[in-house]
Image (cartoon, helix red, strand yellow):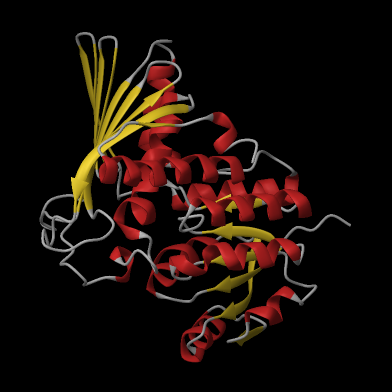
Amino acid sequence: MKKDRINTAIVGCGSFVKGMHLPNISLDNRYRIYAAVDIVGENAKYVFEQYNAAYFTTDYNKVLSDKEVDLVFITTRHDLHAEMSIKAAEAGKDIFCEKPMGLDYSECKEVMRAVRKNRVKYCIGYNRGLAPLITKAGEIVSKEGKPIIMYHRMQNYFAYGSHWLLDEKIGGGRIVGEGCHILDLFCVLSNSNPVRIYGEGGVFTNPDAEGTPDTGAIVLAFENGSVGTMLISSVGNDKIPKESTEIYCGDTAIIIENFQRMRLSIGNKQEDIVLDQVDKGHRIEMELLAKAILDGEILPNDVVSAMRAAVCSFKAVEAIKTHKVQQILPEEFANV
């Protein structure tokens, strides 16, 4: 019998999933928030009570052995993503995992192999490429049939040592842990695969510190000649919008401010589009994932997309550390 609802185990019940994903999927009747898991029992209990789940637990293995669980929704700290994804795949569960896929190339390869071996669905949380204004921009520039040049700024102030994201062993650092969003966005907009990456940067929040870069200017080149430049900065100011995207192709120029406002210029024509609120594509990704699981439609941000942006992020860090251009080969992300 075909299922019409996805029994979902929320694994990691922190502030982000409470503020973003849970409100979205709770309004979609194709999902049932079936179980809540967190090492802090009170966090799991909150989700259990708020969304009328069947149970809550601090034991991840409980949901993996539960035959009623269809989808494992991983929103833990980054150092657990790969291990939990592999265990979920081995248990035959479909997987949604927030970015990043893993903290190094070896982890990501093991995730991809587990997903393919066990034939489960895997979706990574690269929502930016699904944002409505990004989708509209992609449709416009694709009609040109020419390479595009892109720029994306991601800035907000992170004092040195103030957030686990900046810890290479827990969060992967700013480029791996968050920059992967933008590297994926470039792949989506260019509709091409990456071939080379270069960058400069460092630990700008504390120049005397050693470790993974928290700030960088990164250039990503594509097979079709398109180019994306990402400025990711942990020095900045939260009083200006965190993100901005610029896209140029032929006589078309598109500027998107914080996934809410778009200024479109094509030849002599100009148009401004303003959404009611910031929309980074989170809800759309959940809609597409439900269709993929229940109706067999195309999976958004599948394991190859996850691996592709992950490889770009690792090589971006390597480029900054070595001051050398890094080549990106298809077999590194598509045929592992």
Q: Residue at 54% across / 59% down in the picture?
A: 97
Check the image and report above or below for 167 versus 30. Answer: below
Residue 47 percent location from the top left of the image: 51, 80
Quadrant where the image shows the C terminus: top right
Which residue, as the protein is rendered here, is positioned at the far bottom? 42
Side of 253 where 302 appears, left or right: right
Where in the figure is residue 109, as x and y percent of width and height?
60, 50
* Residue 238, quarter of the rendered image: bottom left
Q: Which of the two residues, 72 or 19, is positioned nearer the viewer here?
A: 72
Report the number of numbered marks.
Answer: 0
Q: Quadrant of the N terminus?
A: bottom right
- Position of residue 116 relative to residue 83, above or below, is above
* Location of residue 202 in the rendering, given as x and y in whole percent from the top left corner: 19, 51
Residue 25 visible in image: yes
Question: Which residue is pictured at 46% across the width and 85% down the height?
Answer: 43
- In this rendering, is residue 7 above or below 130? below
Give 324 or 275, whichever is nearer the viewer.
Answer: 324
Give me the residue at 47% from left, 90% from top: 42
